[in-house]
Amino acid sequence: RYLGKNNYWVYIDKGNKEDIEENPNIPIAARVGRMMSDHGEKIVKKVPITSEEEAIGPQQQFVTMNGKVYSLRFQEDFVDVSVKEVDLLNELEVSKLYHCDGLVLCVGKDNSKLLLWNPYLCQTRLIGPRESFHVTDRHAIGYDERRNHKILRFVDNFIKNMNKIEVVYEIYEIRSDSWRVLDEEVNPEGSIDTHQRGVSVKGNTYFVAYRNGLVQEVFLLCFDFTKERFGPRLPLPFDSFDGFNGDLVTLSSFLRGDDDEQLAVLFGGYESGFFEIWVTLTVDPNRASWSKFLRMEPGPFFSYGFKLYSSLSGGSFFVDEENKFAVLFELYGTETAHAAFVFGQDGFFKSSVNLGHALILEHHHRKAARPPLVCSYRPSFVQVKQKMKDLSLLHISKPMCKLLL
C-alpha cells in the first residue's frame, strides 16, 4: 500500500511488489503510474483514505433461493438482515453459486448454463460449453500460482460398449476464454457425488469425497489448480457416512483476520438434530489440521422450526470466527420457507431470520423445495471482460449491482 497524491491509498497486489520496487530511483508516483499502464489488472484498488473501510467493506454473502440470487448483509447483532435481489440475468434460473477471489460462478438449473460474475466491477461473462453441458456436471473455480483463474468441469461419461463410467475433466481458462480437456491422469482417490459443492480456499477447491469398501471412508479431496490434479485424501475430524444414513457434511470458507482464507466443515445428524462445525488451522492440497468451532446438541431451538435436511438436498452455512457466530441456511418448519439460524460458538441458539417463501422447483427431474445456498464474498478487481457479441444475451442492472457492495 502506497500513499499517492491527494491523500489516496494505492493498493498493489503483493505478488507484484518487485515490479514496483525494481528501480528505487524512480519516484513512487511514476512507478505506480507505469504499473497502471503496463499491468493495469495488478492494481488492486485506489480509494480515499477516509473511505478505506467502506471500500473494502465487511464480509458479505450471496445466496440463491428459488432460482434467484440475493445479496445478504447481517447487522452487527445478527438479529436482522438486509436482503436484496440481484437482477443478474433475467433468463437464468440459478441453482448453485461458487466464489473465488472476487469472482462468483453462477450455475443454471440442471447445469444448463454457466455465468461468471464480478459483482464489484459489475462485469459478467456467459460461458458456453466445449461441446455440451450435462445435468451431472460438477464445477469448481480457482487459480494457479500465477493467478490465472480457471474453472474445472467434470462429468460422468457412461461408455456403453464397456459398461463402465469414466470421469471426463475439462478446464476453462478465463484469460483465454477457452476450454481444454485434461489428458493426463487427474488421479482422484475417491468419488465425488453430484450434490457435493466444492469450496475454494487460497485458489484450490476442496470436495467431500468417499470410497467404498468393507467400511466406507469419507474424506476431503483438493483439486490443485496449479498442478491440475487432485491431491491425496485428507482426513475429516469426525466419522460420517455422508448421505447414506442421513448425515449432512458440507463445506464453507471464511477469512481469519484480513486475508487468511480457511476451510470450515459442518457435520450434522439428519434425524437427531445435533451438529458440529470444525475449522482448519492450516490447509493446503496435501494436509489439513482442525479445531472444533462449535457443537450444538438438540435443544430449545427446535421450537423455531430448525432441522437439518439430508445432504442430497443441500443446506449451507458460513462462519464468523471473529464474532464467534455461525449462520446456517435451511428450510423452515414444514419446508415452506427459507430461513437463517444463528448459533454462538458458546453452543447457544441466538436467533432466526425468515428469508421468505420456498417454492417447489424441479431439479434433476425431482420437484422439491431447496434450502438456500450461500457463499461468502470479498470484492476484487479481477477482470471478466464479456465479449461484445455476447452482450445482447445479458440483462444486467448496473445500478442494482452498485448497490450491492
Image (tube, rainbow, N blue to C red):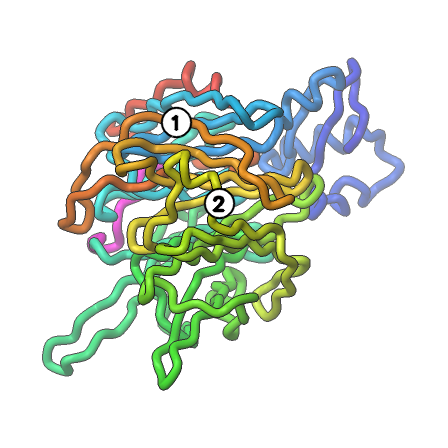
Percent x, y of residue 147: 57, 50
Tell whether label 1 touches label 2 (CB within 8 Å). Answer: no
Q: Residue at x 36, y 86 (%)?
A: 214
Image coordinates of residue 57 in percent, x first then y, are 62, 26
143 to 217, vertically: above or below: above
Quarter occupied by residue 90: top left
Q: Is residue 195 above or below residue 102?
A: below
Identify the disc placed on residue 354: 1
How would you classify the magenta stretch by its main secondary structure? loop
Q: Which mark is residue 84?
A: none
Q: In the picture provided, is 353 more to the left or to the right than 24?
A: left
Instruction: Look at the image and tell me in which quarter the N terminus lies.
Output: top right
Start-end of magenta stretch:
125-134
Q: Amino acid at mark 1?
A: Asn
Residue that appears at 53% across and 57% down: 204
Crowd tier of the residue under label 1, counting other residues whose Cα lies within 10 Å: few below 14, some 14–19, many 20 or above = some
Q: Nearer the viewer, residue 195 or 171?
A: 195
Residue ID for mark 2: 299
Above or below, comparing residue 279 to residue 363 in the picture: below
**In the orientation shown, which residue stands out farthest toward the bottom?**
214
- Dot 2, crowdedness within 10 Å: few (<14), some or many (≥20)? few
Q: Position of residue 337 (x, y in %)?
A: 30, 31
Which type of secondary structure does the marked residue at label 2 adopt? Answer: loop
Q: Position of residue 268 (x, y in %)?
A: 44, 55
Q: Is residue 162 left or right of residue 114?
A: left
Q: CA distance from mark 2 to mark 1?
A: 20 Å
Which residue is drawn at the image coordinates 38% and 64% (left, top)?
242
Q: Nearer the viewer, residue 243 or 187?
A: 243
